Image: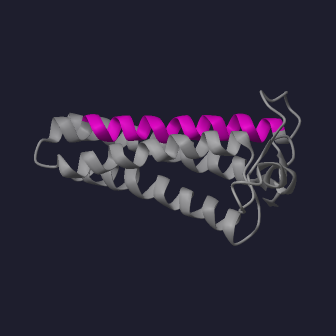
Amino acid sequence: MKSLSLARALALIVPLLLLAGAYGFQYLGGLHPCEMCWWQRYAHFAAVPLALVAFVARARPCVSALFVGLAGLAVGVSGLIGLFHAGVEYGWWEGLTTCSTTPAAGNAADLLSQIMASPITRCDVAPWSLMGISMAGYNGLLSSAAALAILALLLKARKS
């Protein structure tokens, strides 16, 4: 059951860390997310409660494994979206969307001012990269690897 415990931990820790990184870049680094960035976050948002249910259901390994698998699937979906998004940023293919806005903080009564003050974030331009890999690329690589590791650990736990 050690494999299942490790899979459970990965299914919770990976999306939490990647979401923390995304919000850190947004609020500390001033890099506003585009629409496809949000899609990646939504999948991680789904993974966290699924992984938490897996922890609550530790006493029932089959139920716990099911929720770990669902969380791993959500992490994998984020990874695939990240890889697709990275391809859009690198110009390998066209994206489904080109830009989005993040509403600026302000008086809700003055909606037009908020819209005009909102930054426009393009999905086809990487606002940051390290060693030629964008944030979407790192999310794609890390989330896909984590999803494969979770799946492998679940398969190992099943055989034991």
Residue at the front extreme of this rendering: 109
Residue 54 is situated, as x and y percent measured from the top left of the image, at 25, 46
Dominant secondary structure, magenta: helix
* Quarter in which the C terminus is drawn: top left
What count of labels does the image hold?
0
Instruction: Report x, y in % for residue 147.
Output: 47, 41
Residue 63 position, x and y percent, is 19, 36
Farthest left residue?
A: 59
- Position of residue 117 relative to residue 96, above or below, is below
- Point 48% across, 52% down: residue: 15
Task: Specify whether 68 is left or right of 20.
Answer: left
Q: Nearer the viewer, residue 6 or 29?
A: 29
Q: On screen, 130 above or below 98?
A: below
Q: Is residue 4 visible?
A: no
Q: Is 120 on the left or on the right of 8, as rendered?
A: right
Image position of 50 (left or right of 79): left
Colour logic: one colour
* Figure check: 58 above or below 98: below
Toward which corner of the image does residue 104 lie, by quadrant? bottom right
Give the image quarter of residue 123: top right
Q: Nearer the viewer, residue 108 or 39?
A: 108
Q: Residue 120's x, y, as percent?
A: 85, 49
| Residue at 71 percent of width and 54 percent of height | 109
Q: Is residue 152 visible?
A: yes
Q: Residue at x 42, y 58 (%)?
A: 13
Give the extent of the magenta segment.
Answer: 66-88
Left or right placement of residue 9 versus residue 27 in this view: left
